[in-house]
Image (spheres, rainbow, N blue to C red):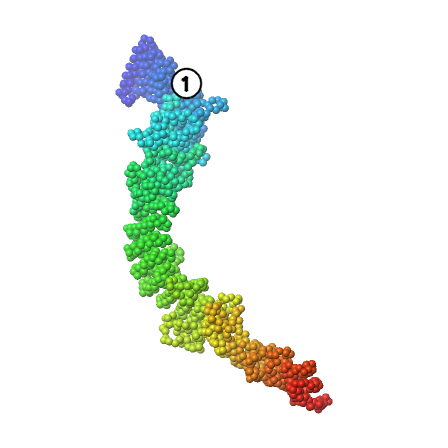
């Protein structure tokens, strides 16, 4: 109403005047003063109206006067007058024309009326109007007005009471509204103190503005009143109730929160007064425990009072709602109290009220968020939010668990459970079957039945106990009310939190999207945003973290207990919402826990599904709520549900059936819904979801059909699945949803898709494990769904291909054939689908994708099952036929698949794969990239190496030859392509900063291709099968020969080092370790020749072939190889191989090694395999005897620079001339060292006499020795004495080697023929070459003569003493020859007949000595002495020599040598170089002339005489060449010669009397010559030195003394023997002595007298008496000899004249 409009003012004036008139009329009689006042008032009003334009303002100014009459009217205490006045005052007030003073007067007047108990309702009305229409009433007047209302509230009249109560409420509101208005008015002008910060000091009230001050004073007094204290401001209050005070506090707090938040003073009141008050008033509720009556407590505990308690909770709700930020600590206390009210020992009404209060909080998610931030996230604070949720949870659980103690309220609760309760509990599942009866929604759990009441979701209904402000006693609570409210709390909590967080998440997502195009300036502000995001995210995570345990515990229990589909649906929806929210916040543990709960609910109770029982690390079945351990109650066994399906569980062990209820199906639908709608946040919980679905699908009997969709099918074994019609209609829907679920995977983001794939893989892995242990049909759910998922995600196949195919490949390895079949089917289907899918860019341009798609095909090769390999090869064949021409970069993979053969695959699979390869080689070589040719080579090689099918191996070697031909023909094209590719690779490698890696790298790519081919053939050369090795070897060396010209020069280095030498190494190793066991037959009925009947012999053939091949390459490519950097190293390696082959224990290999050696030394020209004569043995290879070009048509060598061709033009004599061009002395010396090592090792005798010791064959040794002369031509310039000694050791060793008796007939001549073997001949030739070189060589070389003599002399010794070969026992050849009758006796070793060799050597010695006797080295090295010493051996043996010719030859040699050597010795007498020779010579004469060996019995007289003549020759040599030169000869020697001649002249016999010796022939002629020589020397006139004369005299004295002794002994013996004649030998001896005496007498006569010493004469004369005594002897022979001896004495009967003269002079 517009009070300022002229009409309104006019009306007001009219009304005022009319009111005053009425008043004057009423008071005219009784109250004249009033009448007067009224009339003057009328005048006053009129005057004001007349004089002022702003009438209202003027009225207000004079209002005290205007109002006065009306107040006086009220003072009359007349009800009628009072009513009239009050109405008029109200009218004035309503037009706001009352001044402050007037208002004060009015209030005073009203107070009086109140005290008088008049017009109470009108009073209240007036006060209300006064305070609501204007703000003039302040301070004390205001307080008085308010007290007035309070006082009226406590009158006896109910109407007045209630009206006053309403007025108080309104007045209190008005006071605070004024404050609001005042703040609004001063909002801009006055800078108000800042908002409240905590507990600041109380400010003086005087600082407040008027309205604020009033409000402050009022609120402060309200607190005082509720606390039962006296008010400060509301003076005059008589009584007050707490309930009313609390209601007023609640309304102020609820309606004017801003006041308390903006004014420090008010907030101070809140903190200091309201909160302590509330806490104080709560105490009885907290302390009270229901049912406990502790007598020990002195004061009885105050019982909770429902009205106060309920109002307190309302106040708390408001405080928490509005002032939470201000009262953080206090709210923590309030909330903790609230939680305590839910304890089981609190009265039921208290629990209900507390639950309602909590419900109010639960519908305010932002508030809950604040709790979380302020308490749960602070380090040392109570976890309030968590406690609230947990308290609800444990409260719900407590309602289900009936305590053991008789609790009256609980009992009442169960007792009053309504009609449906007990009945339902008893009926169990039958309840649902009652026709026409709709059961009441309820929870039933272990016999406890609780109905569900309908609680409106968003705000508690009017029936709520928090609204029962009129109730004084706690009302009775319907059964299930608290449970229903708690249930609503949980659902609202979930809804609120999820709605809030999801809205914020969406907002953030929306805010994040436009950022792509944001200018940089705005982007810089972003960090703060993310920080804020992090904070808010942390809060969300904490909220979920705090509540999920309690929520889940409660919801799971309620879901289990729920008998109502709607309730179940709500619970499931809450669980699903929470799972989704946790997923969005990436909180894995709670997400998995909620999903697990849904999964468990989907399955029958106690279903054994491991993934659910053990999953989610942090999700245990027990949670601690409020310090109590609360069990997560497992599903109750007694089901209240209708069973809709019976099926078999999916377990490894067969079990009985399980039942599915309608609730299980409902949960399954929720699960499908969850997966379908929230798949993107499921992450790892896909595992749980899919595992559960798999089991449900299995129980429901759904089986996979083509393409991976599931269709209803029959169970394979056990009782069939039983389905009710209800679920039968559901099945197609479920099947459809399942398929849609996997089809919708195409809309998932990549990460979620990966989680889905991983989960399916993991499920499949479990199904595989299960199928491992039994032969039941496996669950193919996972494999089918993997295929389905793969097929719908072809457009982004790259991201899931690896895990998908990786797992399917594992399935392919499963032992269960059905499972394996599905795995292979899925893999090949996906590969084919992948290759035929129309990608953008197309597959041909996306090399990486093509390789990715083909890779699993390759991986299938690692699986051993033949059915998988079969499928793989079928797939390859299809790919070749369909995509063969466009495979491009896919070729390597396809080739690898073809080549993935293993020896355990069996022939048929290998044959199939080989057909693929043949197809590739015949049709596709030109279409594939050249880079793949190398793989083709590898694959062909691998078919060569497989050992299942020999024919395939040999055919594949043929394929390799064809491939090499292809390379040869298209060489240029291939080379260009490869070089282009190479440049590309090089560039990529440089960009990455890594070196380029490929086999045989530095070589050009085309050469590398050849090298790969060669190395593959090289591998075939060491195959275990001889046929493959032979074929491989021939192909390798043919290919190198035929196409080697294509290789670049430098590549030959690689051919040598990476192909040929490694091949030699491997062949050598295999040969040396090969088995020596005999192989009976070569498979089938093939017989094996004895030369190949062990693995060792077969490998020997390979070794021969390989070594020959490499040697031939060295020969034919000599110039090319020599120009390479490391030729000398290569040469050394080759020599090393030749050496090890030559020293191998196999005669075939060792001989072939020497032939290879001869080939590389180019002693013979290289001969092609086909032209080699069959029996080419080392024996007839004497290359240095004739020209080097072999007979036959001339050969075209593969290179014109072949060494052999050049050498072919020269004979040995010219070899060194040609050699200068090509000779590299280091190489030849390396060859010499190798030759030396071969020689020294092969000829070294065994250390022990071991039967298994290998002894080299004669052909081998011959070939070895034959190499030397030619080799020597190249090294002679540096050939040293040391080398010569080494050579000697080898030659000596070689000829010492015995031969096997079974080989002897072929090598040895018959024993009677004295012929040299080839080996011996070769040895002598070698020495001959040497000595000829020394002859013509420089002086320095000639010091080698003595060494050659030593060598030859050692051979000469063989004549008497055959050399031993270590400790090996050898038989004489004659004995061994005919021992061959035992066919398989072990071979004996036969010593050769060394006589011819020794004699030949002796001839050489004599010839050589004749040439070199005077040579300085020969003289210095005492060669003559050595010759004599050597000859002494056969000479001393004489008849004991193995061959008669030996000693005779030795004698003639001695005579020849001495005839040359003695003059030389006399020449050098002064240098004493021959001093040591003389004793040797004397011993030799002694040993020969007086040999200890007897002549053979059958020696004829003629023979004996011949032999005696030889002895005589020796003596004659002494007399002609030695004795005449006695002055040049040491006297000891001469003495020894004398003694010897003396001994010979006497020819004394042994004293023993054996018959054999009696017949010994006497060498009379010899004795005579000795005696004559002795005498001749004794009395020679040529005595030049006294020494010589002394020697002569000494010799004579010896002779005479000996004669005397013999005669004496004979006379004695004959006298003693009497008539018995003495032995023949004694007679012979005495006869010889007598003859000797007569000879002596003759000699003395002939000698000049001055040469004979007087002593001699006296000794001769002294003989005479002895001779005379012999006269008596009986033997006629003795007598005649005596006569001859005595006759010469006639000349000595007188001493001769010369003697006298001599004496005189």
Between 1289 and 933, the one nearer to me in the picture: 1289
Q: Residues within 10 Å of mark 1 (few under 14, many from 20)?
A: few
Q: How far across and down, in percent of the image, does residue 131 sit?
A: 35, 21
Q: Quadrant of residue 171?
A: top left
Q: Quadrant of residue 1179?
A: bottom left
Q: How far across and down, in percent of the image, does residue 161 sit?
A: 36, 18
Q: Is residue 179 above or below residue 158?
A: below
Q: In this orientation, does residue 1319 appear?
A: yes
Q: Which residue is mark 1?
A: 239
Q: How far across and down, in percent of the image, does residue 647 sit?
A: 34, 40
Between 652 and 416, the one nearer to me in the picture: 652
Give me the residue at 38% from left, 23% from top.
Answer: 475
Q: Is residue 17 above or below residue 678?
A: above
Q: In this orientation, does residue 107 appear?
A: no
Q: Is residue 18 above or below residue 1378?
A: above
Q: How far across and down, in percent of the image, does residue 1129 sit?
A: 45, 66
């Amino acid at each position: 109403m517009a009070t300022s409009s002229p009409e309104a003012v006019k009306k007001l004036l009219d009304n005022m005047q009319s009111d005053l008139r009425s008043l004057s009329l009423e008071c005219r009689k009784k109250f004249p003063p009033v009448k007067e006042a009224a009339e003057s008032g009328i005048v006053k009003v009129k005057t004001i109206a007349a004089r002022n334009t702003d009438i209202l303002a003027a009225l207000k100014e004079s209002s005290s006067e205007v109002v006065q009459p009306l107040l006086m009217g009220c003072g009359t205490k007349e009800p009628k007058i009072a009513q009239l006045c009050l109405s008029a005052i109200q009218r004035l007030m309503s037009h706001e024309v009352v001044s402050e003073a007037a208002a004060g007067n009015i209030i005073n007047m009203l107070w009086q009326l109140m005290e008088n108990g008049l017009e109470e309702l009108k009073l209240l009305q007036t006060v209300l109007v006064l305070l609501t229409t204007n703000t003039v009433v302040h301070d004390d007047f205001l307080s008085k007005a308010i007290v007035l209302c309070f006082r009226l509230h406590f009158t006896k009249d109910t109407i007045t009471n209630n009206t006053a109560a309403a007025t108080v409420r309104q007045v209190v509101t008005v006071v605070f509204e004024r404050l609001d208005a005042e703040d609004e008015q001063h909002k801009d002008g006055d800078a108000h103190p800042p908002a409240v910060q905590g507990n600041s000091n109380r400010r003086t009230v005087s600082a407040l503005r008027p309205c604020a001050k009033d409000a402050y004073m009022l609120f402060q007094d309200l607190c005082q009143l509720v606390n039962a204290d006296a008010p400060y401001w509301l003076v005059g209050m008589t009584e007050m109730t707490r309930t009313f005070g609390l209601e007023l506090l609640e309304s102020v707090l609820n309606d004017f929160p801003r006041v308390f938040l903006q004014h420090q003073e008010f907030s101070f009141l809140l903190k200091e007064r309201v909160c302590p008050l509330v806490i104080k008033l709560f105490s009885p509720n907290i302390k009270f425990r229901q049912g406990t009556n502790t007598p020990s407590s002195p004061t009885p505990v105050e019982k909770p009072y429902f009205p106060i308690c309920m109002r307190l909770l309302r106040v708390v709700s408001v405080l928490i709602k509005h002032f939470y930020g201000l009262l953080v600590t206090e709210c923590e206390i309030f909330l903790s109290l609230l939680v305590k009210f839910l304890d089981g020992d609190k009265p039921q009404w208290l629990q209900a009220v507390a639950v309602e209060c909590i419900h109010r909080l639960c519908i305010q998610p932002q508030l809950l968020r604040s709790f979380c931030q302020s308490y749960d996230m602070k380090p040392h604070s109570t976890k309030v939010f968590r406690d609230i949720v947990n308290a609800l949870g444990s409260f719900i659980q407590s309602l289900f668990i009936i305590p053991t103690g008789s609790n009256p309220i609980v009992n009442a609760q169960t007792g009053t459970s309504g009609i449906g309760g007990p009945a339902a509990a008893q009926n169990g599942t039958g309840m649902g079957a009652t026709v026409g009866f709709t059961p009441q929604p309820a929870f039933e759990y272990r016999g406890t039945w609780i109905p569900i009441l309908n609680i409106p979701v968003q705000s508690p209904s009017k029936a709520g106990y928090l609204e029962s402000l009129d109730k004084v006693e706690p009302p009775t609570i319907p059964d299930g009310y608290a449970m229903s409210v708690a249930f609503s709390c949980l659902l609202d909590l979930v809804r609120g939190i999820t709605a809030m967080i999801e809205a914020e998440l969406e907002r953030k997502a929306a805010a994040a999207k436009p950022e792509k195009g944001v200018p940089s300036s705005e982007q810089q502000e972003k960090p703060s945003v993310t920080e804020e995001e992090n904070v808010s995210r942390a809060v969300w995570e904490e909220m979920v973290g705090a509540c999920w345990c309690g929520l889940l515990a409660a919801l799971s229990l309620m879901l289990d207990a729920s008998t109502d589909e709607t309730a179940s649906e709500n619970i499931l929806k809450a669980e699903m919402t929470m799972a989704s929210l946790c997923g969005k916040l990436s909180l894995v543990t709670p997400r998995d826990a909620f999903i697990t709960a849904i999964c468990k609910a989907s399955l029958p109770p106690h279903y054994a599904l491991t993934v659910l029982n053990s999953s989610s690390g942090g999700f245990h079945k027990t949670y601690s709520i409020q310090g109590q351990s609360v069990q997560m109650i497992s599903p109750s066994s007694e089901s209240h549900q209708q069973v809709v399906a019976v099926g078999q569980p999916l377990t490894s062990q067969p079990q009985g059936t399980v039942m599915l209820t309608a609730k299980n199906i409902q949960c399954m639908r929720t699960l499908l819904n969850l997966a379908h709608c929230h798949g993107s946040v499921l992450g790892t919980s896909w595992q749980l979801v899919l595992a559960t679905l798999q089991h449900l699908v299995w129980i429901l009997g759904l089986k996979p059909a083509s393409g991976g969709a599931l269709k209803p099918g029959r169970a394979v074994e056990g009782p069939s699945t039983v389905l009710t019609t209800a679920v039968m209609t559901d099945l197609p829907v479920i099947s459809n949803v399942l398929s849609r679920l996997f089809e919708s995977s195409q809309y998932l983001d990549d990460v979620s898709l990966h989680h889905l794939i991983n989960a399916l893989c993991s499920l499949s892995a479990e199904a595989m494990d299960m199928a491992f242990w039994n032969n039941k049909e496996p669950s193919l759910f996972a494999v089918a769904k993997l295929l389905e998922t793969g097929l719908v995600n072809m457009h982004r196949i790259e991201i899931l291909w690896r895990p998908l195919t990786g797992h399917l490949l594992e399935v392919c390895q499963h032992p269960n054939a059905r499972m394996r079949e599905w795995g292979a089917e899925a893999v090949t289907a996906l590969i084919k689908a992948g290759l035929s899918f129309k990608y953008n860019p197309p597959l041909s341009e996306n090399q990486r994708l093509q390789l990715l798609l083909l890779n699993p095909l390759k991986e299938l090769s690692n699986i051993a099952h033949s059915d998988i390999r079969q499928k793989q090869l079928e797939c390859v064949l299809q790919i070749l036929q369909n995509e063969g021409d466009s495979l491009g970069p896919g070729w390597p993979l396809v080739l690898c698949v073809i080549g993935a053969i293993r020896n355990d695959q069996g022939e048929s699979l290998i044959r199939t794969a080989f057909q693929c390869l043949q197809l590739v080689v015949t049709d596709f070589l030109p279409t594939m990239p050249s880079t793949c040719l190398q793989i083709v080579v590898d694959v062909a090689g691998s078919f060569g190496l497989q050992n299942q099918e020999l024919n395939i191996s040999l055919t594949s070697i043929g394929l390799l030859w064809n491939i090499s031909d292809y390379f040869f023909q298209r060489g240029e094209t291939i080379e260009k392509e490869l070089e282009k590719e190479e440049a590309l690779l090089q560039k990529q490698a440089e960009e990455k900063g890594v070196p380029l890696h490929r086999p045989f790298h530095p070589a050009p790519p085309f050469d590398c291709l050849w090298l790969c081919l060669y190395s593959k053939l090289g591998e075939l050369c060491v195959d275990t099968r001889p046929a493959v090795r032979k074929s491989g070897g021939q192909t390798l060396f043919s290919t190198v020969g035929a196409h080697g010209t294509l290789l670049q020069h430098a590549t030959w280095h690689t051919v040598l080092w990476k192909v040929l030498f490694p091949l030699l190494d491997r062949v050598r190793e295999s040969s040396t370790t090969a088995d020596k066991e005999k192989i009976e037959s070569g498979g089938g009925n093939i017989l094996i020749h004895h030369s190949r009947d062990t693995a060792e012999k077969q490998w020997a053939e390979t070794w021969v072939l390989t070594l020959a091949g490499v040697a031939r390459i060295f020969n034919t490519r000599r110039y090319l190889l020599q120009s390479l950097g490391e030729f000398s190293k290569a040469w050394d390696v080759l020599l090393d191989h030749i050496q090890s082959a030559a020293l191998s224990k196999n005669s075939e290999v060792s001989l072939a090694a020497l032939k290879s050696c001869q080939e590389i030394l180019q002693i013979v020209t290289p001969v092609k395999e086909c032209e080699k004569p069959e029996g080419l043995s080392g024996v007839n290879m004497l290359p240095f005897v004739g020209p080097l070009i072999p007979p036959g048509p001339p050969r075209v060598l593969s290179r014109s620079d072949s060494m052999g061709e050049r050498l072919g033009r020269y004979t040995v004599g010219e070899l060194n001339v040609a050699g200068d061009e090509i000779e590299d002395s280091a190489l030849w010396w390396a060859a010499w060292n190798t030759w030396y090592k071969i020689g020294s090792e092969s000829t070294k005798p065994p250390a022990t006499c071991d039967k298994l010791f290998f002894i080299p064959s004669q052909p081998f040794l011959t070939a070895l020795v034959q190499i030397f002369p030619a080799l020597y031509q190249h090294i002679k310039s540096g050939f040293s004495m040391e080398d010569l000694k080494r050579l000697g050791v080898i030659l000596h060793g070689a000829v010492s080697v015995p031969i096997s008796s079974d080989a002897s007939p072929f090598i040895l001549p018959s024993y009677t023929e004295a012929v040299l073997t080839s080996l011996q001949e070769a040895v002598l030739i070698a020495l001959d070459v040497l000595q000829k070189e020394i002859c013509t060589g420089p002086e320095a070389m000639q010091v080698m003569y003595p060494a050659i003599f030593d060598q030859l002399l050692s051979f000469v010794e063989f004549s008497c003493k055959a050399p031993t070969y270590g400790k090996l026992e050898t038989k004489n050849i004659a004995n061994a020859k005919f021992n061959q009758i035992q066919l398989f006796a072990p071979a004996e070793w036969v010593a050769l007949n060394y006589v011819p060799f020794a004699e030949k050597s002796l001839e050489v010695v004599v010839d050589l000595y004749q040439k070199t006797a005077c040579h300085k080295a020969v003289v210095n090295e005492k060669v003559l002495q050595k010759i004599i010493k050597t000859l002494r051996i056969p000479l001393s043996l004489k008849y004991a020599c193995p061959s008669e010719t030996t000693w005779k030859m030795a004698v003639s040699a001695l005579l020849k040598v001495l005839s040359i050597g003695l003059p030389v010795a006399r020449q050098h007498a002064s240098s004493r170089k021959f001093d040591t020779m003389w004793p040797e010579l004397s011993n030799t004469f002694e040993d020969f002339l007086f040999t200890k060996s007897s002549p053979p019995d059958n020696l004829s007289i003629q023979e004996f005489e011949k032999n005696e003549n030889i002895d005589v020759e020796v003596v004659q040599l002494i007399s002609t060449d030695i004795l005449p030169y006695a002055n040049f000869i040491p006297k000891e020697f001469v003495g020894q010669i004398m003694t010897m001649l003396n001994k010979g002249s006497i020819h004394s016999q042994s004293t023993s009397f054996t018959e054999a010796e009696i017949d010994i022939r006497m060498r009379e002629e010899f004795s005579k010559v000795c005696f004559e020589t002795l005498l001749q020397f004794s009395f020679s006139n040529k005595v030049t030195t006294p020494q010589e004369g002394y020697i002569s005299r000494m010799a004579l004295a010896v002779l005479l003394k000996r004669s005397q002794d013999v005669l004496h002994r004979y006379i004695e013996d004959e006298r003693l023997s009497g008539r018995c004649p003495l032995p023949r030998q004694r007679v012979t001896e005495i006869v010889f002595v007598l003859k000797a005496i007569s000879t002596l007498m003759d000699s003395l006569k002939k000698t000049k007298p001055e040469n004979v010493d007087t002593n001699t004469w006296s000794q001769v004369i002294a003989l005479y008496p002895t001779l005379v005594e012999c006269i008596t002897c009986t033997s006629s022979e003795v007598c005649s000899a005596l006569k001859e001896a005595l006759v010469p004495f006639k000349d000595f009967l007188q001493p001769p004249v010369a003697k006298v003269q001599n004496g005189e002079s």
